[in-house]
Image: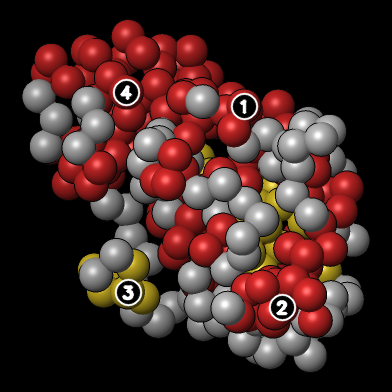
């Protein structure tokens, strides 16, 4: 099997910088990853990093489809129960689009629970965290995974709480709102490039992108998601995620 061979024989590359994109499901992390990966200095993998290794627990394989934060102990690395960092590096290196490039990017949703561990094992790691309106995220999780809006809201709040706690422990981090990126894509992407020390003029941010079967320019999809929620749904979501909905000043209105 390719992963077994990479773990044993693959070369652990030494890029100048690792970029980790983190955030809850349905928060725009795939789009953000793809835009950054379009930069000619950035290498990426064909899928989320969790699917390009045998070292990370995959939520759907342990009964936590789009709800990893309901059982975070399975994903936060602990002594005696953590990934083999060297095997992980070799496997990821072997899956990179061009391992000769100076910057590698990776995105796996449960990595919000592994930020401190990744920072410890990956040299010069930079973390970009994306937060989106919890009502829109809960609707997306409900629609795509069949989870109740209450469970989806709990996943949103718990995963973001864990992510923020982990980010407090690392040096290089940038926390962004989906709404800001979609409102001012050029300005926000330049801010990201400045944070990463990359030339923003080489980015392809103004093109159309295909994410989960939908092709469009960078734009805010919250209104469509919120329109699918009933008043009862919105009340349930607020009951479950009031703390962070208020903290980020998110409402149920578009």
Between disc 4 and disc 3, the foreground one is 4
Q: How many marks?
A: 4
Residue 211 drawn above or below residue 27: below
Q: Secondary structure at mark 4?
A: helix
Which label number is shown at residue 210?
Answer: 3
Q: Nearer the viewer, residue 208 or 102?
A: 102
Mark 1 neighbour density, 10 Å: few (under 14) some (14–19) many (20 or more) = few
Residue 204: horizontal and vertical position, in percent?
51, 82
Q: Secondary structure at mark 3?
A: strand
Of callouts 1 and 2, the N-terminal one:
2
Of callouts 2 and 4, the N-terminal one:
2
**CB atoms at circles 3 and 1 under 8 Å apart?**
no
136 left or right, relative to 122: left
Tell me the quarter of the image containing the C terminus.
top left
Task: Give the residue at mark 1.
Answer: 73
Tell me the quarter of the image containing the N terminus.
bottom right
Between disc 1 and disc 2, the foreground one is 2
Task: Give the residue at mark 2.
Answer: 6
Task: Give the residue at mark 4.
Answer: 151
Residue 147: horizontal and vertical position, in percent?
24, 32
* Mark 4 and mark 1: Cα distance apart in space: 17 Å
Mark 3 neighbour density, 10 Å: few (under 14) some (14–19) many (20 or more) = few
State the residue at coordinates (12%, 37%).
227
State the residue at coordinates (46%, 24%).
70
Of callouts 4 and 3, the N-terminal one:
4
Which label number is shown at residue 216?
Answer: none
């Amino acid at each position: 099997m390719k992963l077994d061979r990479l773990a044993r024989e693959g070369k652990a590359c030494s890029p100048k910088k690792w970029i980790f994109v983190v955030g809850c499901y349905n928060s725009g992390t795939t789009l953000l990853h793809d835009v950054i990966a379009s930069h000619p200095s950035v290498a990426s993998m064909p899928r989320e990093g969790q699917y390009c290794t045998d070292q990370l627990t995959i939520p759907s394989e342990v009964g936590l489809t789009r709800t990893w934060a309901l059982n975070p102990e399975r994903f936060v690395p602990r002594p005696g129960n953590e990934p083999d960092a060297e095997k992980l590096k070799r496997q990821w290196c072997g899956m990179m689009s061009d391992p000769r490039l100076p910057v590698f990017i990776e995105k796996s949703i449960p990595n919000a629970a592994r930020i401190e561990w990744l920072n410890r094992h990956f040299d010069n790691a930079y973390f970009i965290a994306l937060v989106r309106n919890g009502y829109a995220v809960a609707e997306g999780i409900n629609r795509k995974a069949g989870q109740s809006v209450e469970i989806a809201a709990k996943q949103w709040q718990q995963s973001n709480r864990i992510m923020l706690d982990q980010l407090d422990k690392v040096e290089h981090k940038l926390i962004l709102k989906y709404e800001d990126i979609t409102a001012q894509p050029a300005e926000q992407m330049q801010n990201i490039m400045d944070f990463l020390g990359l030339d923003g003029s080489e980015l392809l941010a103004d093109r159309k992108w295909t994410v989960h079967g939908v092709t469009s320019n960078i734009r805010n999809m919250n209104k469509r998601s919120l329109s699918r929620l009933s008043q009862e749904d919105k009340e349930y979501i607020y009951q479950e995620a009031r703390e962070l909905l208020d903290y980020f000043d998110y409402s149920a209105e578009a």
